[in-house]
Every structure is written in C-alpha cells, then in structure tokens.
Image: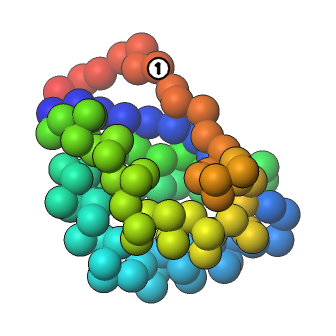
Amino acid sequence: MERIASIMYLYEGQQEEYKKRHDELWPEMEQALKEHGASNYSIFLDPATDILFAYLEVADKATYDKISKTEICQKWWAYMAPIMKSNEDNSPVSKDLVQVFYLA
C-alpha cells in the first residue's frame, strides 16, 4: 500500500461549500476512486489559511493515476473548479508532500 499526501487551496469563503460538496460526493465519483484503488482517503482543512491537506492510500499509484482520465473525475474537477485553485484542465492546483516519518 502506498500512502499519498498533498495540499490544495480553497478560495476564500468556500469552506462550507467545499465540505457540502464532499458530504454529497457523487456515488459515481466514490466508485471511481475505489475502482482505482483509493482507500483511507481523508481531506483536512486549515480554516485560517484555506489550505487543504489530503491523504489517501492506494494499492498501486500507476492504477490510481489513471483516474484523472475518466469522465467522472473530469466532471468532478469542473464542478469543484469555481471554489478552489485549479489548473487549466480544472484539476486542483496541488503540491505533493514527501513523507519524512511513519509510525506503524
């Protein structure tokens, strides 16, 4: 199992909307995440900075990375783009984090 962590950035005033959209995660998006090997997926918010910290585990990163090519993922990105910093393809602007410690 590979652990992945990253940070993303909300636009100011979008904290409640971001949470609402994830509370109502589309079943098709949840299914795609699971089909691409995602598990133990959590997103945390620093309310003072609007920075999101995402953590998930994947069985195989190459398989997980293919989710970005799916229609449902691209639709989700377009849905989320108005409330968070996004790239030209609507994917969230994110920074991958490097693990420096792990306690099993």
| Residue 15, horizontal then vertical, whole percent | 70, 70
Q: Residue at x 66, y 79 (%)?
A: 17
Q: Nearer the viewer, residue 75 or 33?
A: 75
Residue 36 at x, y percent in the picture: 22, 53
Q: Secondary structure at mark 1?
A: loop
Q: Position of residue 51 (x, y in %)?
A: 68, 48
Q: Is residue 3 above or below residue 36?
A: above
> For residue 65, which quarter of the picture?
top left
Quadrant of the rendered structure where residue 57 is?
A: top left
The type of residue carrying mark 1 is Val
- Residue drawn at (67%, 78%), measured in percent from left and top? 16
83 up-or-down from 96: above or below: below
Q: Tell me, yes or no, if residue 60 can be seen here.
A: yes
Residue 46 visible in the shown view: no
Identify the residue at horizontal 18%, vertical 60% (top origin).
35
Placement of the N terminus among the 4 image quadrants: top left
Please provide percent x and percent y for residue 3: 29, 33
Residue furthest right as drawn: 12
Give the camera-side residue of 66 and 4.
66
Is 67 on the left or on the right of 58, as rendered? right
Total number of numbered labels? 1
Left or right of residue 3: residue 74: right
Q: Residues within 10 Å of mark 1 (few under 14, many from 20)?
A: few
Q: Farthest residue to the top: give it.
A: 100
Q: Is residue 9 left or right of residue 30?
A: right
Q: Which residue is mark 1?
A: 98
